[in-house]
C-alpha cells in the first residue's frame, strides 16, 4: 500500500534539518471577541476550506487560495465589528481581514480598536503576525515579528513544524490606551512550549497607531541576553545537523534504540528509490535484557506479516548482530510464503550475519537489502543539493 503522495521525503528532510516541536491544528471556526466593557464585539468568519489536507497540498504547490472551496470567491476571512447601542448590536464595519484563512487570536478595546494575531496554521510567520484596526475598520498597521524583535531573537524562539511559539495571551491596558503583548523569552536549553515556567517579557504598543512603546529595563535586557545565548546554541545545533546530513551515515555504536530508528529512517532517505513518496516501517530489536525485548521482537513479526507492508518498505536493526539474526529467523516463520514479493526489507547487518538473514527471509520472497553497518552511507546527491539550496535560501533571508 503506497503512502502519501505529498513528498514525504521532502517533509522529513525539513524536519531532520530543523529541530522542532510537534503541533496540531483544529479546523478554523467562527470566533467572537468582546471588549472588556462588553460594548464592542468582533466576530471573525474564517475563509472556508475543503479540508486541511487540500490546504496543505496547495500550500506546498504554491497555489493561491489554498484549500479553497470550489465556487467560493472569498480569499480572506471576514471581520464583523458590532457595537451595543440601546441594548441592540449594531454593525460598525464588516470587511475582509488581511489574513489568509483566519487569525489565531484577537483583542478589542473599549474604544473599538482591535488587534489580530498570527495566522491559522502558521503562528509567527508573515507580515501580518500583528494587525491593528481602527474603530471604523480601517487598517492602522500590520507587521511581522522582525518589525519589533531583533533577528537573533526571532531565530532563537522555539518552533513547531508549522509555527513560531513567540507570545503569551495579549491584553488591553485601557488606562494607557495600549496593547500589552507578552513575548516568549528564548532559553539556551530548549523547553517544551507548555511548561508552566516559560518566561515572558511584556512589550507595549499604542492602540492609536500601532507603534511600539520604547522598551527599557532589566527584564528586556535579560531577555535579549537569553535570546543571544539561545541563538548561539541554535546555530551550533544547526551546524551539527548540517554536518550529519552531509557526512556519510554511520550506524550507532551503542544500544540506543531511538538512535537506531533514526539511523534506519535516514538510511531509507539516502538509498531507497521511492524515498520521496514512501515512508518505511522501522523495527529495532533490543538486547535480551531489555524488559520490552519480547514485545519489540514480536513487533518485528507483526511488521513482516502486516498487509500494509506487503508492497512497502521494512527496515530492521538491533544493537546486537546475533540478536538481529536470531530474531529474524524466529519472526520470519510467521510470514506466509511469497507474502513480501513486492516489498523491500533493509537489514542493518554485517557481512558475517547476512547469509543467515537472507535464508530466513527467503520464503517471504522479499527483496532483502543489506545496510552494511561497517560502511558509511553517503548522502543522496539530489537530496543534498536541495538541502544546500534551502540552507542558502535561509541564510539569505536572515
Image: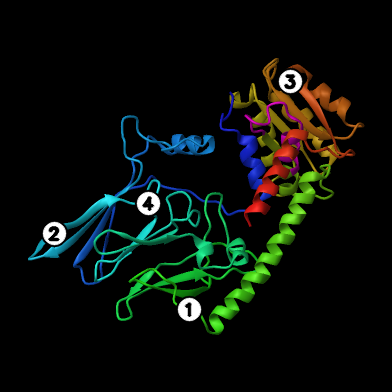
Q: Are marks 4 and 3 in contact (CB under 8 Å)?
A: no
Q: Which residue is mark 3?
A: 366
Q: Residue furthest bottom?
A: 217
Are there few (<14), some (14-19), or many (20+) residues within 10 Å of tag 3?
many
Q: Is residue 216 visible?
A: yes
Numbered disc in front, either 2 or 4? 4
The residue at 58%/29% (across/down) is 3
Q: Which residue is mark 1?
A: 214
Are there few (<14), some (14-19), or many (20+) residues within 10 Å of tag 2?
some
Q: Quadrant of residue 383?
A: top right
Residue 202: image x %, image y %? 46, 75
Mark number, residue 89: 2
Pick whichever of labels 3 and 1 is earlier in the sequence. Answer: 1
45 lies left or right of 248 = left
Are there few (<14), some (14-19), or many (20+) residues within 10 Å of tag 4?
many
Give, as a single range, the part of the protein colored magenta.
263-280
Pick whichever of labels 4 and 3 is earlier in the sequence. Answer: 4
Mark number, residue 98: 4
Front-lying residue, 264 or 359: 264
- The relative height of residue 177 versus residue 153 in the rendered view (above or below) is below
Front-lying residue, 337 or 374: 374
Q: Are marks 2 and 1 in contact (CB under 8 Å)?
A: no
Pick whichever of labels 2 and 1 is earlier in the sequence. Answer: 2
Amino acid at each position: 500500500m503506497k503512502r502519501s503522495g505529498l513528498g514525504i521525503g521532502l517533509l522529513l528532510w525539513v524536519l531532520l534539518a530543523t529541530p522542532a516541536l510537534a503541533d496540531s491544528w483544529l479546523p478554523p471556526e467562527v470566533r467572537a471577541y468582546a471588549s472588556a466593557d462588553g460594548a464592542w464585539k468582533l466576530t471573525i468568519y474564517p475563509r472556508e476550506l475543503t479540508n486541511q489536507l487540500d490546504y496543505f497540498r496547495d500550500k506546498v504547490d504554491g497555489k493561491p487560495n489554498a484549500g479553497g472551496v470550489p465556487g467560493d470567491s472569498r480569499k480572506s476571512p471576514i471581520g464583523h465589528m458590532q457595537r451595543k447601542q440601546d441594548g441592540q448590536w449594531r454593525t460598525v464595519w464588516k470587511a475582509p481581514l488581511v489574513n489568509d484563512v483566519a487569525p489565531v487570536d484577537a483583542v478589542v478595546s473599549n474604544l473599538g480598536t482591535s488587534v489580530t494575531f498570527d495566522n491559522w496554521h502558521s503562528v509567527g510567520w508573515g507580515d501580518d503576525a500583528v494587525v491593528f484596526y481602527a474603530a471604523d475598520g480601517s487598517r492602522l498597521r500590520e507587521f511581522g515579528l522582525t518589525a519589533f524583535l531583533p533577528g537573533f531573537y526571532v531565530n532563537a524562539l522555539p518552533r513547531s513544524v508549522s509555527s513560531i511559539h513567540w507570545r503569551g495571551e495579549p491584553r488591553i491596558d485601557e488606562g494607557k490606551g495600549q496593547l500589552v503583548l507578552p513575548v516568549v523569552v528564548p532559553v539556551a536549553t530548549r523547553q517544551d512550549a507548555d511548561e508552566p515556567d516559560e518566561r515572558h517579557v511584556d512589550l507595549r504598543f499604542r492602540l492609536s497607531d500601532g507603534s511600539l512603546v520604547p522598551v527599557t529595563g532589566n527584564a528586556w535586557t535579560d531577555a535579549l541576553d537569553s535570546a543571544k545565548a539561545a541563538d548561539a546554541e541554535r546555530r551550533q545545533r544547526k551546524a551539527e545537523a548540517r554536518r550529519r546530513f552531509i557526512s556519510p551515515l554511520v550506524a550507532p555504536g551503542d544500544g540506543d534504540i531511538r538512535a537506531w530508528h533514526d539511523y534506519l529512517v535516514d538510511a531509507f532517505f539516502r538509498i531507497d528509490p521511492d524515498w520521496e513518496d514512501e515512508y518505511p516501517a522501522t523495527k529495532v530489536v533490543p538486547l535480551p535484557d531489555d524488559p520490552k525485548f519480547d514485545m519489540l521482537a514480536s513487533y518485528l513479526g507483526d511488521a513482516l506479516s502486516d498487509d500494509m507492508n506487503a508492497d512497502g518498505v521494512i527496515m530492521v536493526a538491533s544493537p546486537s548482530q546475533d540478536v538481529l539474526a536470531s530474531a529474524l529467523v524466529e519472526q520470519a516463520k510467521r510470514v506466509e510464503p511469497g507474502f513480501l514479493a513486492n516489498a523491500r526489507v533493509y537489514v542493518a547487518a554485517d557481512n558475517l550475519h547476512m547469509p543467515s538473514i537472507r535464508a530466513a527471509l527467503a520464503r517471504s520472497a522479499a527483496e532483502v537489502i543489506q545496510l552494511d553497518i561497517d560502511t558509511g552511507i553517503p548522502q543522496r546527491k539530489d537530496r543534498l543539493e536541495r538541502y544546500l539550496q534551502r540552507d542558502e535560501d535561509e541564510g539569505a533571508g536572515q
